């Protein structure tokens, strides 16, 4: 299964010039711990960075900087790991593990933003799949018992 089939497509994003205080408001309003930073290019959003609630705490608040004066472009992580929407789920997990990232933007063939895949969402998906496998084992035992009576 491709990551594009399971990623979250309603991505909360900001532009690099969004003030940090506004980014924090967006995170609170949408109940997310990160914002994808994207720029418009040829009619599509292209991811250029990511900023997390942790970035705001460590880079702004702990440093006693003014969140009204800084932009997300000032504090965002620019070494962004993206994954094509056609990539498999397990290949995506391997990439995330290799790069040490908890979330990856999912992009189309032209680099346009399609969605985001996060560890939390992938764990939930895998847990559901494992539960279904466990149910299969129980059904198989019941079937065998009934057949052998």
Image (cartoon, grey):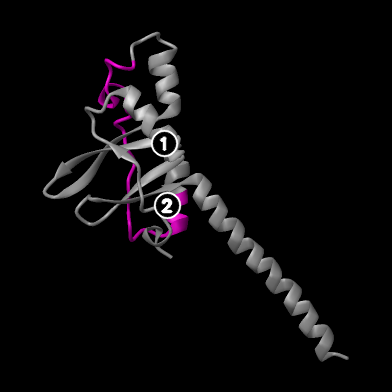
* Cα gap from disc 1 to disc 2, whole angstroms: 28 Å
> Vertically, is 117 above or below 13?
below
Q: In the rendered image, which quarter contains the C terminus? A: bottom right
Q: Residues within 10 Å of mark 2 (few under 14, many from 20)?
A: many
Magenta highlight on residue 86 = yes
Q: Residue furthest right?
A: 149
In the drawing, what numbered circle is on residue 138?
A: none
Q: Position of residue 122 (x, y in %)?
A: 51, 52
Q: Is residue 49 left or right of residue 27?
A: left
Say which residue appears at 27% left-offset and 15% top-offset. Answer: 69
* Stretch of the chain drawn in magenta: 67-93
Q: Secondary structure at mark 2?
A: helix
Q: 55 left or right of 69?
A: right
Taking 108 as reference, is 81 left or right? right
Q: Which residue corresponds to mark 2?
A: 92
Q: Nearer the viewer, residue 45 or 31?
A: 31
- Considering only vertical position in the picture, is 4 above or below 118? below
Q: x, y percentage for residue 58?
A: 44, 18
Image: 53 above or below 86:
above
Q: Mark 1 touching mark 2, by CB under 8 A?
A: no
For this orientation, the residue located farthest to the left is 42
| Badge 1 or badge 2: first in the primary sequence | 1
71 magenta-colored: yes
Question: Which quarter of the picture shows residue 55?
Answer: top left
Residue depth check, mark 1 versus mark 2: number of the one nearer the observer: 1
Which residue is labeled 1 in the image?
Answer: 29
Q: Position of residue 147 (x, y in %)?
A: 81, 90
At x 14% / y 44%, what residue is drawn?
41
- Please name the residue shown 41% across and 60% down the image: 88
């Amino acid at each position: 299964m491709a990551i594009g089939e399971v990623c979250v497509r309603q991505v909360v994003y900001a532009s690099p010039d969004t003030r940090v205080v506004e980014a924090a408001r967006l995170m609170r309003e949408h109940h997310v711990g990160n914002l994808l930073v994207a720029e418009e290019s040829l009619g599509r959003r292209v991811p250029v960075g990511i900023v997390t609630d942790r970035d705001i705490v460590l880079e702004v608040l702990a440093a006693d900087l003014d969140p009204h004066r800084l932009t997300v472009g000032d504090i965002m992580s620019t070494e962004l790991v993206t994954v094509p929407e056609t990539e498999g789920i397990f290949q995506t997990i391997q990439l995330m593990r290799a790069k040490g990232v908890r979330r990856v933007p999912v992009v189309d063939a032209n680099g346009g933003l399609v969605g985001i895949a996060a560890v939390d969402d992938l764990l939930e998906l895998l847990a559901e799949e494992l539960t279904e496998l466990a149910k299969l084992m129980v059904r198989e035992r019941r079937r065998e018992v009934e057949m052998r009576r």
